[in-house]
Image: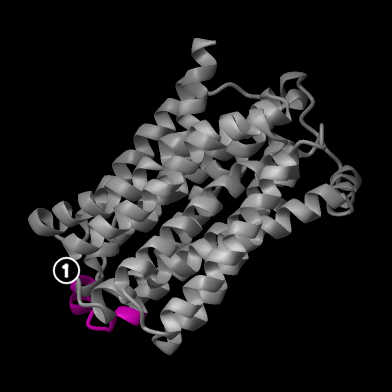
Amino acid sequence: MRNLSIVVFILALLNTLESLSIDLYLPAFPSMAQIFQTDIGHIQISISVFFAGFAFGQLLWGPLSDRTGRKPMLYCGLFLFIVGATAIFFTENIYVLWAMRFLQAFGGSAGIVIGRAIVIDLYDRQKSVAIFSQQSQISGIAPIVAPLLGSVFLKFWGWNSSFAFLSIMGLLTLLMVYKYVPETNARMTLSDHSEDEKGLKDHLKAILSNKEFINSTMIGSIAFASLIIYISNAPFLFMKLHGFSSGTFSLIFGFNSLALITAAYITPKLVKRISDTKLLLAATLILLIVCSLHILIAAENLSVALEIMMLYLSLLAIGILFPITSAHALSPFKEGRGTGGRCDGIYAVNGLLSYFQDWRGF
C-alpha cells in the first residue's frame, strides 16, 4: 500500500511538470518580449507550441508503452523534457524557444498519457476516478504556486531560471520513476515484448468505435480547449489589457487555480453520493452556462471581479470533468490502455486553436 501511495505521488508529479512548464514563466512574458526583441503575442505562441507538442507526443507514447513497456517510454519522455528545458535556459532566439518548447512538451506528454495508463492498469473505474482526483489535488498546487515562484525567479535570477528549475525537477522525477514506479504493463511482466501491427490496429479500432470513449473524449475536448484558451490569454488579459503587475497577476492566477484543487477534493466525495455519469453531466452543464455568462460579462465590459469569478467557476467545472472523463474513456479496455490514453489525449490538439489567436495578437 505504501509503495502504491508513492507511485500515485510520482504520477501526480508527472502531471505537475506539465503545469509548472506552463504556469511558471507566465509572469516573465513582458520581460521575455524585451529580451527576445519581440511582442507578447510571439511569446504567447510558445504556449500554443507547447500544447501542440503535448498533443502530438501523446500520439506516440501510448502505443509505444503498450508495445515496449511503461517505464522505458517514461525514461525517454523525461529525457526529452530535460533536454528541451535546458536548451531554453541558454537561448535568446524566439525560434529556438518555440522549437524547444515543442520538444519539452513532446517529452513531457509521456508522463501524462502513460500515467493514465498506469492508473487504469492498477485500479477499477471508480477507484481510478478517486486516484485521478488525488493526483489533481497534488498537481493542482502547481498553478497556485508556480506564478508566484516564477515572479521570485524573475526578480532575483531572470526569466530563464524557471527553465533551470524545470530541468532539475525533470531529473529528480526521472530518478524517482526509476526507483519506485513498477512496470504495470501485464504483457511486459509476462516477458511478451511483441505486439504485431494487426494487434495494434485491432486495439485502435475497438477504442475508436467505443461510444463511451468517444463521448468522454469529446467532453474532455471541450474542457481542455477552455483551459488552453484561458492559460494562453491570461497574461495578455490581466497584465496588458487590465494593467496588473506580474505579482498581482500571479495572485489572480493562483486564486483561480484554487478551483482545480477544490474540484479534486470534492469530486471523489460527490462520486460516492451520486453516480459519476450524473456528475459528468452536471459539470458539463455548469461549464456551458458559466462560459456563456463570461461572454456576456466581457461583451458588456462589466467588473474585473465578475470576470475572475466566472473564470473560477469555469475551472471548478473543468477540474471535475478531467478525472471522470479520463476514467470513463480508458476503463472499458483491458488491453491497449496506453493506446487508449494516447487517443484520449488527442483532444490536446485544441491547443492549436490558441496558436491562431496569438498570431492575431488577440
Q: Residue at x 28, y 46 (%)?
A: 145
Q: Residue at x 29, y 63 (%)?
A: 26
121 above or below 324? above
Is 158 situated left or right of 333 in this image?
Answer: left
Callout 1, which amino acid? Ser
Q: Is residue 253 left or right of residue 3?
A: left
Residue 227 lies, in percent from the top left, at: 50, 61
Q: Nearer the viewer, residue 151 or 340?
A: 151
- Mark 1 neighbour density, 10 Å: few (under 14) some (14–19) many (20 or more): few
Residue 141 drawn at (x, y percent): 36, 41
Which region is colored magenta? 31-41
Query: Where 220 sits versus 170, above or below?
Result: below
Could one spot residue 268 in this view of the protein?
Answer: yes
Instruction: Name the image quarter holding residue 160.
Output: bottom left
Is 10 inside the magenta-drawn segment?
no
Which quadrant: the C terminus? bottom left
Residue 56: where, in percent of width, then height?
61, 60
Q: On the rendered image, what quadrant is the N terminus found in?
A: top right
- The image shows a total of numbered marks equal to 1
Position of 312 relative to 138 (above/below): below
- Asked whether residue 36 is drawn in magenta, I would say yes
Q: From the image, tell me which residue sits under label 1.
A: 245
Residue found farthest to the bottom: 360
The residue drawn where x is 33% and y is 39% is 169
Task: Give the secondary structure at mark 1.
Answer: loop
Residue 82 visible in this rendered orientation of the protein: no
Q: Position of residue 183 (x, y in %)?
A: 63, 24
